[in-house]
Amino acid sequence: MKTKVALVTGGYTGEAEVSYKSSKFVYSQLDKDKYDIYLIDITPSGWFYKDEDDNQYPIEKDDFSLLLNNVKVTFDVAFIILHGTPGEDGRLQGYFDMIGLPYTSCNALTSSLTMNKGYTKAILADIPELYVAQSVLLFENHREQAVSLVESKLALPYFVKPNAGGSSIGMSKVKFAEELKGALDKAYDAENTGTQVLVEEFVSGREFSQGIFRNAKGELVVLPATEVRTTREFFDFEAKYIPGLTEEITPADLNQEQQYRAARIIKEIYIRLNCKGMVRVDFFLENDTDKFYFIEINTIPGQTAQSFIPQQVRAFGMKETDFYSELIEAALL
């Protein structure tokens, strides 16, 4: 009998558009001989199963079941490809925990924690060989004095970003003091990001993104790194999703010592944060010092054919079909 997989997509933020692209690719790669796959769309207006003809059937939230042709369908596992809330911030994971449904991503606590960039940095700050940029975490009640708080503690230039956002939505690079107020307002007002803002000092260096996952044997596997080179000021939403603005080199040009060091650091990050499934760690390699600076961790990384993780899976010599099967089988253990 085939394993019934709920492929969960959609979401409540602007990242839903990316979720649909990711889930479409994952669906195309999943092994249909091993799995019965049901595409579940979670939106503010409702939770639905969508069949291949785009017909919608409501999900029963008591047990995440489905009624098809008067037959109740339940699932063996949820494959979460939902960027932003509620799929990346722990809410959906907490619900699945309550009803006893296994899933492919990090648990509720880790997912919630890692959506908070400032808290994540605090937990990782003492990992050997890993550095974190100087930063200020601003809450909603800091808004009136935010400019003075930043200027008193950090040196220009700054990165200003929503503390609980994704896809670089609401993010700005600030090179001049007069730009700070507008950048803070943009980050504070980003939709569904909790009105918290993280401001960091700029780190000058090469930017990398690297995946890691736990396979069905329980082994941690670090994928080859991708180097990101963009014509934009930084790797913003447009650079991520508009073709031609960014060059992505997979595998990245890192020497052997840098590769080993990155793998050690990324494994320790995965363990320290109690991650599960696949995650992606973004970092800088600072010019002149050769120090690795943590940027952020993504617990539901993008999964289009051009996304970093599929690129790295292919560079590792693995097919996406086998990779996704490993994630499902590991979740079922």
Image (cartoon, rainbow, N blue to C red):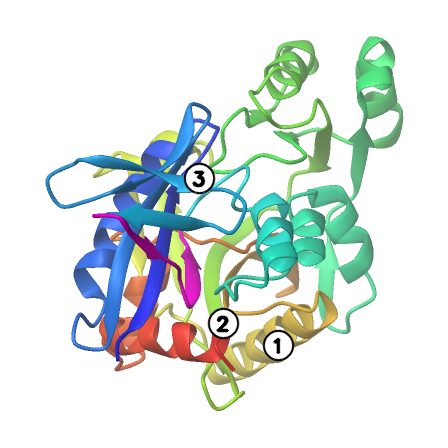
What residue is shown with label 1? Answer: 267
Asked whether, in this view, residue 215 is left or right of residue 288, the answer is left
First in sequence, mark 2 or 1: give its number.
2
31 over 20 or under it: above or below: below
What residue is shown with label 3? Answer: 235
62 over 294 or under it: above or below: above
Can you tell which quarter of the image residue 49 is in?
A: top left
Which quadrant is the N terminus positioned in? bottom left
Residue 80 inside the magenta-drawn segment: yes
Dots 2, 1 in contact, CB < 8 A: yes
Residue 310 inside the magenta-drawn segment: no
Asked whether, in this view, residue 54 is left or right of residue 116, the answer is left
Q: Looking at the image, which residue is at 34% across and 63% down?
A: 5
Q: Note whether residue 287 is visible.
A: no
What's the magenta region? 69-81
What residue is shown with label 2? Answer: 212
Considering every residue shown, the one lying at the far front of the view is 70
Residue 19 placement (x, y as % from top left): 36, 42
Numbered disc 3: secondary structure: loop
**Label 2 crowd (10 A; few <14 / some 14-19 / many >=20):** many
Disc number lying in front (3 or 2): 2
Dots 3, 2 in contact, CB < 8 A: no
Asked whether, in this view, residue 332 is left or right of residue 141, the answer is left
**Label 1 crowd (10 A; few <14 / some 14-19 / many >=20):** some
Inter-mark Cα distance, 3 to 2: 21 Å
